[in-house]
Amino acid sequence: MKGASPTELLEDALSRGFLLKTRASASKIRAELQFFHKRLPKGTMEIRGALDLRKRQVLIFLVLLGLSRAGTESAHYSVAEETEIGSFVANLARDLGLGVEELSSREARVVSDDNKKYLHLDLLTGDLLLNEKLDRDELCGSTEPCVLHFQVVLENPLQFFRVELRVKDINDHSPTFLDKEILIKISEGTTIGTTFLMESAQDLDVGSNSLQNYTISPNSHFYIKIPDSSDRMIYPELVLDRALDYEQEAELRLTVTAVDGGSPPKSGTTLVLIKVLDINDNAPEFPQSLYEVQVPEDRPLGSWIATISAKDLDAGNYGKISYTFFHASEDIRKTFEINPISGEVNLRSPLDFEVIQSYTINIQATDGGGLSGKCTLLVKVMDINDNPPEVTISSITKRIPENASETLVALFSILDQDSGDNGRMICSIQDNLPFFLKPTFKNFFTLVSEKALDRESQAEYNITITVTDLGTPRLKTEYNITVLVSDVNDNAPIFTQTSYTLFVHENNSPALHIGSISATDRDSGTNAQVTYSLLPPQDPHLPLASLVSINADNGHLFALRSLDYEALQEFEFHVGATDRGSPALSSEALVRVLVLDANDNSPFVLYPLQNSSTPCTELVPRGAEPGYLVTKVVAVDGDSGRNAWLSYQLLKATEPGLFGVWAHNGEVRTARLLSERDVAKHRLVVLVKDNGEPPRSATATLHVLLVDGFSQPYLPLPEAAPTQAQADSLTVYLVVALASVSSLFLLSVLLFVAVRLCRRSREASVGRCSVPEGPFPGHLVDVSGTGTLSQSYQYEVCLTGGSGTNEFKFLKPIIPNCQVHDTGKNMGEIENFRNSFGFNIQ
């Protein structure tokens, strides 16, 4: 910014260096502040005032920023400079909350920003130790605090921790004057109180160990004054306390001592030679107080940098001006030189932008009378692309398993010492590779496998990491990595079928081979050797171990015992196939065993009960119509399917043609009308036969008793297989029924007699006592549970007196739907009814 005032220059520096970096860390902002301070001229009060104001503002900002980010501060440690190698710094495992075993297993390492190994991490103890002696003055110069930044890198999984090590200063340097003798020319006409600038001493220490004070040897003309400085530097000024007299003393020699604040303090001295001159009333003046030039860092040695020129209105010796560097550091004196007569500034040693980006040079112009003026030359070093990118490998894995996905292959960092586009880098690898680069932290990258690899397809990969900057011309660095793919057991056995169905006839012989299963493994060697096993059944009640066994080598399945379809129709279980890899992989398949039924069970008659000592007798009224349901034979078969299909057949009968059996359900019905000539007792033998090959059969014997005047059929009890106790209960029921009927008959007679007596006792009028007439509906339902059709009957009970037929009606069945009006027609209907039920009449 040529022509800008110092205040404008400061505002520009602050806006670019601070206001646009509000998200930078506090240490970086502090470094920026010190950096821009060094670029400002030391003697300009206006700039210093502005800088003080900005510093206060930035410090307030730093406090607020620190409070807001207190939860994310890094680990901080401190160590004194020049501490011996191997000294203990901190226990990193405890501070990070990690176990020592975890540090070792995750391959923890300490990586510094400049790739120098200042610290060593002991993985056995978790201690952070010094790896070399640290020189704070060499590492940080005048920057305070001196903080070295490190990263603790943990792998598997990848994790970073920020560590800051503060190097504390010790008083190991004495203040030193660069000039062993300082020449000051003072006119004898100089007024009392006039100050004369002196060259300051240099002290590489900082803080309380740095330069603190100046003293002067006892004299009667001068004393030392230390003015306040905005940059907190201590500059000595020589103050005239008593007027000089050239005639009395033309030359004075004084000793100035610089003292630091160490314990014990150290000091350095220089000789001040004061020459008293004649009066010179005009000091040299520069056209501007600040000169700014830009110089590329590859400028050759001896090149011209700038020409600084001042004017003095005096004539003669008082008007002759000589130029010198003023308050110049050792770096400035080594890098630049000035022609004392012409004021030309030339390059003395090479520039390096990566080391120093700018120089602030104070130039003093002194005339022949000893008066002087000063200006500032700001030399900005321009960066050129002279540094190729650097690749630093932190860890590398040259062999990875083939089935691993997103496996860390390499961890590395890239660095370019240049700035701007020259320092911006692009990192890449070849296309069409199953690997990718993943940025992690700052300039750290990880090379990770993108997917699971297949060693059988490609066993080796050559990966080239290419890092290119964006400078002109572009510089690039390549790093080659060879990755080998190792074979692992990544294929589980696969069954030829997901489920198997095996059929076994019941009553098989033990150790019968019932089938085989098979699985294949795409791996090779021991990884492809498959063994078979039975898996625990899901049903805890299934005795699988006693039912089947499997050959572990070939998968053959054997039945261990004879199977019974009636006890176990089917069962299923899982078989496993496991290879011999490490770790072993396995798969499973479902095996369903179906037991095929054989006709090994004869029909079993449930009703009528055949083993009862008292046979069950069925009662049939002689007035029963054809198709009258006598009883039903109930039988079951333990087999299934066709083997359990039952058919019924009347095998023997006392009187053939009187009864018939329905072949499908075992119902026994009358085939014709009963007559008085039919015998009262009948014995029927019913054959029950299944449909198996060969068929099996059983017989049921029925006893039928024909009774007169009993119109309601006898029905068996609900139980499917009545016992002897049930037969006795039935006899009791019959006795109770007969007693009830007798009681009812006696009650009816008594009512009849009472009605007759009541009518005779009434003379005035005809009295009548009667019982309401009408049908009493009654319903009798089949409760045998065998599916017999239910029947309903109605009985008419009536007592009459007086006029009428005087007929006593008792238990006369009323069956409206079955009344016979036409004998011939009725017989035809009965025949059709019998044929419709499929009677088997013998």
Image: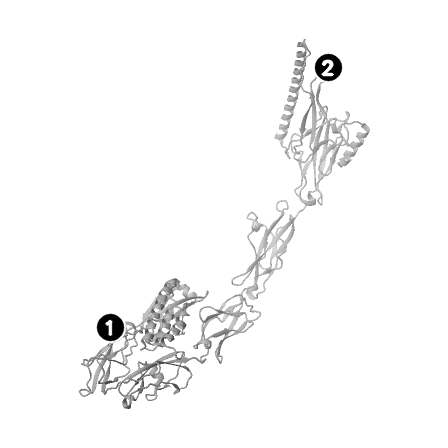
Q: Residues within 10 Å of mark 1 (few under 14, many from 20)?
A: few
- Report which quarter residue 297 is drawn in: bottom left
| Residue pointed to by mark 1 | 263
Q: Earlier in the sequence, mark 2 or mark 1?
A: 1
Q: Report the Cα–Cα distance between label 2 and label 1.
A: 156 Å
| Residue pointed to by mark 2 | 803
| Residue 14 percent coordinates (x, y) | 38, 72
Q: Which is more toward the observer, 290 or 431?
A: 290
Q: Secondary structure at mark 1?
A: loop
| Residue 96 percent coordinates (x, y) | 38, 63
Q: Secondary structure at mark 2?
A: loop
Q: Which is more toward the observer, 26 or 743?
A: 26
838 vs 380, left or right, is: right
Would you place residue 1 above or below residue 770 in this image? below
| Residue 169 percent coordinates (x, y) | 30, 72
Q: Residue at x 49, y 73 (%)?
A: 427
Would you place residue 148 above or below residue 384 in this image? above
Q: Amino acid at mark 2?
A: Ser
Q: Which is more toward the observer, 337 or 102?
A: 337
